[in-house]
Image (cartoon, rainbow, N blue to C red):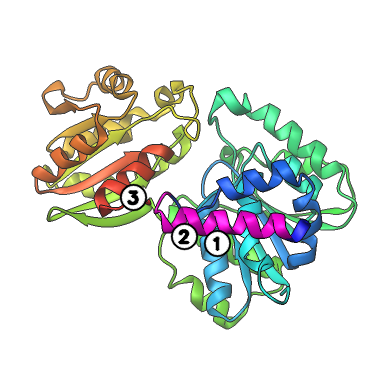
Amino acid sequence: MESLIIKGAYILTLLLRFLKLGHGSTLPGRTLLKIYPHFLNKYLPLLSNKSVYITGTNGKTTISRLVSTSLEQAGFPIISNYFGANLPSGVASCLLPSLIKPKLVKSVLVLEIDEGAFPFLLGCFVPDVVCFLNLSRDQLDRYGEIDITIGKWVQALNRVPREVRVIYSNNKQDGVFPLKNLVTNKLVDFIPVSAVSEIWENNQIFASNILKSLELLTVKTQKNLASVTPAFGRGEIINFQETEFKLILAKNPASFTKNLISLEKISQDKASYTVALILNDNIPDGRDVSWIYDIEKEPLLKLCDGANKVVVSGKRCLDLALLCKIYEIPKEKVVIISDISKALDTVASYKRKALVFTTYSAMLFSRKHLKGSKMP
């Protein structure tokens, strides 16, 4: 019976991909867990050779990609939720391909974990390494304030029954440094990492520390890190209608501001680019969009001031238009187009490099439109 349930979930994955309705990274796992609630408790330890959970507000998908790709290129068998489905349903889905093989192969589990789902998944399985990247205000309707999430992480870590190495950013602005002083479980070994301001360099530093903690940092895996490209939607370049679009996932004040600062140089080349800001309030984005008013004013104003146009779009485009007014972005530059497809077509018509800042669901829709496919 158990085998049939797993095969059925995997068939659902193949069906979704065949019909081009998605990657099958969520629905199969969600269905499976409803029928078989203890699936993760059983199969995470069975499939694990070495393992890491990567969590935090920003950088999870990119760092997971860095670690998993560098190991895969070095010949290690890998299981990872590549498409960023980081809830229990996504973790369950990514295990399925390994379970329909004739022989079970233990692999390195590289799993990005949603901040809110971390305590549950740590209760299902304790990995060798946990990496806490950062914590900032994000989806307040789901998580509440930072202190609430930190408290739940602390409770989960205090309950682990075996040794676990915890990598964390010791930069105060990243918000996770209090963990070391709050966790009393002696089985938890804390490893501080000093984060840097440059986003890609910072991601590589954390990835390198994860490999080291897994005892898998070799000359080859370190070299492989340098060749990894950004995860989809995270600085990804897509050419559409003779226009270069750079997709930038910016779903909270911290990630938005960091990306703005990283683009300071381009703002010096006046009118050579178009800025598009796309804001949705779907479930993956969080219903509460008040976080946009915590974006630092000066970097946004500077980037928009150098653009030929600032196109605002998405379900909450009027909130973005209000933000532009509050931040004193010249009104003659602001173009309001609620329909994302039409907004992207308009941006392409300007025939300038496009910098597109999006929330999660808007990023997936934008990729589908720009790539001309049903799947993101």
Q: Residue at x 24, y 30 (%)?
A: 339
In what element is the residue under mark 1?
A: helix
Percent of width and height locating residue 57? 56, 41
Mark in the foreground, 3 or 1: 3
**Residue type, numbered disc 1:** Ile
| Image spot of residue 325 (x, y percent) | 24, 18
- Up-down relation of residue 87 to residue 17 (above or below): above
Q: Which residues are magenta?
A: 4-21
Return the residue at label 2.
201
User: Callout 1: few (<14), some (14-19), or many (20+) C-alpha neighbours within 10 Å?
Assistant: some
Mark 2 secondary-structure assignment: helix
191, 284: nearer the viewer: 284
Sequence-first tag of 3 and 1: 1
Numbered mark located on residue 374 in the image: 3
Name the element at disc 3.
loop
Looking at the rendered structure, the kind of residue marked 2 is Glu
